[in-house]
């Protein structure tokens, strides 16, 4: 099933208040004592086989199939992850988020998710693939299962989770100031650490071609097309100066999948080669069928 069911299941839990660096490119998690077998690359839909003839564990079982090298996840931060979910009882796929969308985002460790996630994913390094075998008491059992998703109250669940990391809601760029530029020709951006930057568009015609400026120079790894970038961002219309989109206004970072059809060409080209920890100004002329030049200010917090 698709990301839509993921959102619905998470929304049910949130409403009910029920307590629901990069690693190696590929790995195989051998079963060992009747454990599930997992294969595949981080960030891609895994292969998961469950030994259904074996009685599942009665306690939460946590294994790292691919070890990450990024920062450890923190309680109270926003978790970015992809996952794949099967029911142990029948080895049946319930849902997954590997449908071309960016990783979804949820608060971790604050009682908004099933206990198996809230506790099992704390302290996991970014870039890790984790296999969680979640018994009913640690999963959907306390709320009677999710019958519409094929999950019964007594079902043990197996999640494969690719952890992109956790981030503070107000995380921002952390590098050194970039080189000065002509703010009579390009928008001026006031640096407000931990808050939405103030963008002032000059009273001149916008440039005919894309423009980019590094406002804060980070020291992390570079971002490349095809990757997923975790960012804070603000977008304004050059003509009016009005904010049309902002992760700051939503009180959490966003994930950009830098592939055609998932992000605009201006963002893909403008973020290529930018280092994690940087803030960049991107001026993007209108694409086909559009009329307005857009101004993006993007803080790159992480990439995978």
Image (cartoon, rainbow, N blue to C red):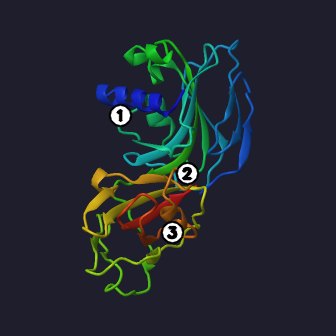
Could you give the CA–CA distance between mark 1 and mark 3, rounded to whole angstroms?
38 Å
Identify the residue shown where x is 54% and y is 40%. Answer: 82
Residue position marked by numbered label 3 in the rendering: 270
Q: Taking the image as drawn, is residue 288 in sight?
A: yes
Identify the residue shown where x is 49% and y is 65%. Answer: 266
Estimate the x, y position of residue 9 in percent, counting from the top left.
Answer: 42, 27
Could you give the CA–CA distance between mark 1 and mark 2, rounded to whole angstroms?
21 Å
Which structural element holds mark 3? helix
Residue position marked by numbered label 2 in the rendering: 126
Q: Residue furthest front?
A: 289
Question: Toward the viewer: 169 or 63?
Answer: 169
Estimate the x, y position of residue 57 in percent, counting from the top left.
Answer: 60, 20
Which structural element holds mark 1? loop
Question: Toward the viewer: 50 or 72?
Answer: 50
Estimate the x, y position of residue 284 in percent, counting from the top left.
Answer: 43, 68
Which tag, 1 or 2, sits closer to the chain's start? Answer: 1
Q: Residues within 10 Å of mark 1 (few under 14, many from 20)?
A: some
Q: Residues within 10 Å of mark 2 (few under 14, many from 20)?
A: many
Identify the residue shown where x is 48% and y is 30%. Answer: 116
Please indicate whether residue 163 sits to the left or right of residue 39 in the image.
left
Question: Toward the viewer: 162 or 283?
Answer: 283
Relative to 180, residue 13 above or below: above
Residue position marked by numbered label 1 in the rendering: 111
């Amino acid at each position: 099933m698709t990301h839509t069911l993921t959102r619905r299941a998470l929304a049910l839990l949130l409403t009910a208040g029920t307590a629901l660096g990069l690693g190696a490119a590929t790995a195989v998690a051998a079963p060992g004592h009747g454990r599930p077998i997992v294969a595949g690359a981080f960030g891609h839909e895994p292969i998961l086989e469950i030994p259904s003839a074996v009685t599942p564990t009665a306690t939460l079982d946590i294994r790292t199939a691919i070890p990450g090298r990024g920062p450890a996840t923190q309680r109270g931060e926003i978790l970015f992850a992809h996952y794949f979910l099967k029911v142990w009882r029948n080895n049946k796929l319930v849902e997954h988020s590997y449908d071309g969308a960016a990783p979804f985002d949820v608060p971790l460790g604050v009682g908004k998710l099933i206990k198996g996630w809230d506790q099992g994913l704390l302290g996991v390094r970014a870039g890790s693939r984790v296999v969680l075998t979640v018994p009913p008491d640690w999963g959907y059992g306390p709320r009677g299962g999710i019958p519409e998703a094929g999950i019964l109250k007594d079902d043990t669940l197996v999640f494969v989770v690719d952890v992109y990391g956790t981030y503070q809601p107000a995380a921002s760029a952390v590098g050194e100031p970039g080189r000065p530029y002509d703010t009579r020709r390009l928008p001026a951006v006031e640096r407000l650490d931990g808050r939405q930057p103030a963008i002032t568009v000059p009273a001149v015609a916008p440039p005919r071609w894309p423009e980019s400026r590094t406002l804060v120079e980070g020291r992390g790894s570079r971002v490349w097309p095809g990757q997923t970038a975790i960012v804070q961002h603000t977008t304004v219309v050059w003509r009016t100066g009005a904010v049309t989109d902002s992760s700051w206004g939503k009180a959490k970072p966003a994930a950009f999948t830098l592939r055609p059809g998932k992000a605009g060409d201006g963002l893909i080209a403008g973020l290529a080669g930018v280092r994690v920890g940087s803030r960049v100004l991107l001026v993007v002329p209108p694409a086909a069928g559009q009329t307005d030049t857009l101004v993006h200010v993007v803080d790159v917090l992480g990439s995978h």
